[in-house]
Amino acid sequence: MRATTLLNRVLDLPGARVSGVDPQALLGAAPLVVDVALKRKNLVCSRCSYATKHRYDVRVVDSRWRHLDVGGNKCVLQMRRRRLACPTHGVVAEGVPFARAGSGFTTAFEDLVVWLVTRSDKTTVAKFARVAWRTVGTMCQRIAAEVINPDRLEGLVRIGVDEISWRKHHKYLTLVHDHDTGAVVWGAPGKDAATLEKFFDELPVGQLPEAVSMDLGPAFIKAVGVRAPDAVVCFDPFHVVQLATSALEKLRRQAWQEARQAADQDFAAKYKGARWALLKNPGDLTQAQQATLDQLRSCGGKLWRGYQMKEALRDVFAGDLDPDATMGLLQDWCARAQRSRIPEFVTAARTIRKHRAGIAAAVDMGLSNARSEGNNNKVRTMIRRAYGFHTAEAALALIMLTCGTVKLELPYQT
């Protein structure tokens, strides 16, 4: 069997055939360089669908694309491309069906790398594929621009808005997810009102969401009030409970600071190590954390009262009560917090009462940012695994590929 015939069957390039190969490369001493030719006669613009039979000229150098490895050796495709005069983009090199425009890699190679990077860190993938670390990020952005559905913002009825840190020093991304699918449908750098207004700018004309769930921050409330005044603003119960959690953490820190002034440093260490015993759900505590919690119960005091109030608020939103009963218990909790004379919980109760209408709407409609928080946990894992990103665009591209509506597949997957 001729080498070109064998490579045609092995490579199985769409719309192209193997026309030649360097015999020395077959010995494995160098990268396998394969000459290819297109099967079609017409020239197609690499940036649009314009096609013509008329050739402008031929490039003076070969174009090269890195392909999937063959037998552990790099495989490089090369071809002398023709050029055409596109009425929109001018004189450009013809497009090829096995590679994306402007890329030095075949579609199959890029699909493999991006599929791997959604499941592993970029450094490992770059070493495995034998490409530069930055090249992996560029592939993610290129594929995200191609595969993300431009119509994904149509028909959005109930959405959730949240922000997440993608880098140290207060670098944030605003993410919008669809409550019906749980997928991230939009994202942009920043976390202020102007950032969320960009989302409304990209919505189809005359289409606005009916309900928007969010945290209690004023920026998103302002943006929705200005751009979608008829939308029902829902304050996620998760973030309501987080008010009590934050208040309890402040109490623990105060107790720790006061204990540090005492002579017995073991007493201070008890409060320092009690953080997760106080913040975690009782059913998720380890044996050591449960012992720490029992010790705090025996000591009593303001910290233990704060813990009881945090758990009481969490029980309000357990989901086993009807909306009227839930809001009644929430009102009782706020009254109890006001009477506790614990400043942190008094402030939390005032915040809850201020946003009572939005909380009631979330309870009535059953909206929660639980899926959004699940996606955020996945994103945080991805960011830690990648050891950070150099640009917000690279982080956002990987988020959309991992948590969006896109379903990536391996090349040649059956």
Image: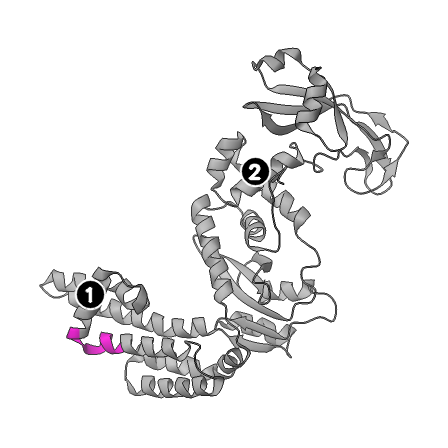
Q: Few, some or many C-alpha atoms within 10 Å of disc 2 (few <14, some 14-19, many ≥20)? A: many
List the residue tagged with mark 1: 292
The verdict on residue 302 being magenta is: yes
Q: Using the image, determine if residue 390 lies above or below residue 223.
A: above
Q: Quadrant of the N terminus?
A: top right
Q: Which residue is mark 2?
A: 113
Which residues fall within the magenta stretch? 298-306
**Mark 1 Cα shell of 10 Å, populated few (<14), some (14-19), many (≥20):** some
Residue at horizontal 36 percent and vertical 84 percent from the top:
333
Q: Image check: 368 left or right of 37?
A: left
Viewer-proximal residue among 348 and 209: 209
Q: Name the amino acid type tagged 1.
A: Thr
What residue is shown at x 62% (from left), y 24% (from top)? Answer: 75
Q: What residue type is disc 2 on? A: Val
Residue drawn 54% across the image and 31% down it = 131
Q: Secondary structure at mark 1?
A: helix
Image quadrant in which you'd find residue 91: top right
- Tell me the chief SS of the magenta region: helix
Residue 36 place in picture, x, y as percent = 74, 23
Q: What residue occupies the far right of the structure in this picture? A: 54
Q: Nearer the viewer, residue 176 or 33?
A: 33
Dot 2 and dot 1 residues touching (CB under 8 Å): no
**Residue 113 visible in the snapshot:** yes
In magenta segment, residue 60: no
- Left/right placement of residue 114 relative to residue 18 reads left
Residue 7 horizontal side relative to residue 39, left or right:
left
